[in-house]
């Protein structure tokens, strides 16, 4: 029966990898390849696990270990829950325990059994993977979005934690937990994995459901801007604010800036949105807020009300001024001024 489940899970997994790879351009690159690596490592485990090798009985293929799946899944959740688009080179260090585990397994074959140093290293490495699993479980529990993997991650993590605990107990010479011994663990895990692959297959076939964060299709993909023009226009936009102080005009529009700088409106929008991580209104208002603070510092403006100073720097109403100021500074203008008066300095 277990062999049948292995074969079914293996076939499903190969289909999932193929379908994922076919639609890889739709998804964000980092999370795609981490999920791809997770599924690939599970397939290797199904294919050649030491205790359930699909082709050879009692064959020790220690390279096909579930710890690789743990690391890939750990990194998958790490990137799924953040906005980072590119994989950081430093995160390759998370695979170091897998490499060390592989090296230890190689040495274990060469050295006499029950070598104390090898066992200590194995316990330490198992604890590292337990920490990875703890992070995964924490990510799943605290993620309000309840992503698709939640229903499968919790039982898989629980199984792997108990597997690690059993490995540690075995290494230090204590009795393993019978409910999660090697044979039971493999049966449970294969059943969950088979359902997981089936579920992913369903989602891949259902075009209305997304299994991964998709690439954002930029509305500027046909832009004629090159690197030189981008830097030139950025410089001109900043100069128009810092030197010419165009933002002091309370009715300033993107059309006004376009005519002043002789830059197309769509190029201004593209520069701000794609290359300066802002939009036109936020770009203008941030300068207005800073100008307001500079004028508030000046004792010559003590006779003016906050709204009076705000009007001078380009804000048109009290409500919008208060909302915009709090957005950038985290305080209302009144709170900001009170802090200044109490502490003798500005809290920014």
Image (tube, rainbow, N blue to C red):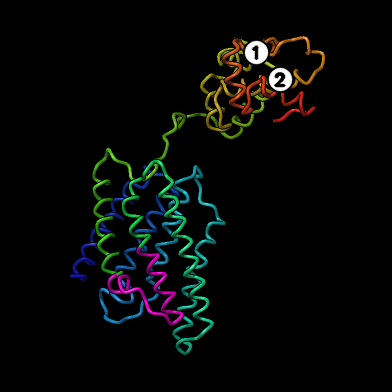
Q: Residue at x 70, y 17 (%)?
A: 245
- Front residue of 87/128: it is 128
Residue 214 position within the rendered picture, expressed as x and y whole percent measured from the top left: 39, 41
Classed neighbour count for the residue bearing mark 2: other residues with Cα under 10 Å, few (<14), some (14–19), many (≥20):
many
Q: Describe residue 283's horizontal placement relative to residue 68 as left or right.
A: right
- Measured as percent of width and height from the top left, residue 312 is found at 69, 11
Tag shown at residue 291: 2
The answer to whether mark 2 and mark 1 are in CB contact below 8 A is yes
Q: Is residue 185 left or right of residue 245?
A: left
The residue range painted magenta reads 159-184
User: Residue 71 at what x, y percent from top left?
Assistant: 45, 61
Front residue of this view, candidates 340 and 66? 340
Residue occupying image coordinates x 40% and y 65%? 161
Q: For this view, does 139 lie left or right of residue 265?
A: left
Q: CA distance from mark 2 to mark 1?
A: 9 Å
Residue 170 drawn in magenta:
yes
Q: Which image quarter is the C terminus in?
A: top right
The numbered disc on residue 165 is: none
Q: Is residue 279 magenta?
A: no
Rendered residue at 26%/51% (across/down): 199
The residue to which callout 1 is attached is: 314
Return the x and y of residue 278 as percentages of the image width and height. Answer: 56, 28
Quadrant (top left, top right, bottom left, bottom right) of the N terminus: bottom left
């Amino acid at each position: 029966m277990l062999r049948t489940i292995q074969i079914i899970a293996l076939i499903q997994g190969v289909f999932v990898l193929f379908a994922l790879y076919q639609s890889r351009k739709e998804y964000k690159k980092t999370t795609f390849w981490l999920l791809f690596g997770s599924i690939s490592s599970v397939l290797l485990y199904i294919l050649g696990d030491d205790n359930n090798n699909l082709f050879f009985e009692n064959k020790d293929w220690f390279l096909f270990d579930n710890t690789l799946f743990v690391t890939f899944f750990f990194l998958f959740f790490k990137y799924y829950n953040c906005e980072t688009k590119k994989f950081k080179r430093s995160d390759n260090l998370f695979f170091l325990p897998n490499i060390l585990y592989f090296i230890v397994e190689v040495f274990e074959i060469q050295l006499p059994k029950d070598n104390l140093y090898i066992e200590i290293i194995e316990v330490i490495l198992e604890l590292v993977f337990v920490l990875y699993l703890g992070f995964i479980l924490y990510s799943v529990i605290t993620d309000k979005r309840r992503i698709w993997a939640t229903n499968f991650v919790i039982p898989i993590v629980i199984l792997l934690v108990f597997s690690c605990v059993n490995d540690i107990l075995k290494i230090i010479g204590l009795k393993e937990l019978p409910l999660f011994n090697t044979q039971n663990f493999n049966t449970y895990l294969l059943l969950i994995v088979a359902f997981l692959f089936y579920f992913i297959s369903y989602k891949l076939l259902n075009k209305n459901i997304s299994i991964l964060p998709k690439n954002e299709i930029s509305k500027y993909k046909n832009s004629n801007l090159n690197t030189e023009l981008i830097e030139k226009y950025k410089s001109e936009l900043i100069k128009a604010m810092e030197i010419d102080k165009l933002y002091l005009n309370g009715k300033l529009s993107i059309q006004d800036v376009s005519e002043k700088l002789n830059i197309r409106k769509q190029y201004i929008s593209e520069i701000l949105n794609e290359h300066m991580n802002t939009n036109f209104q936020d770009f203008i208002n941030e300068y207005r807020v800073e100008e307001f603070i500079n004028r508030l510092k000046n004792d010559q403006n003590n006779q003016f009300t906050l709204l009076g100073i705000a009007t001078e720097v380009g804000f048109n109403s009290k409500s919008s001024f208060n909302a915009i100021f709090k957005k950038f500074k985290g305080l209302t203008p009144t709170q900001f001024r009170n802090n200044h008066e109490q502490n003798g300095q500005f809290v920014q």
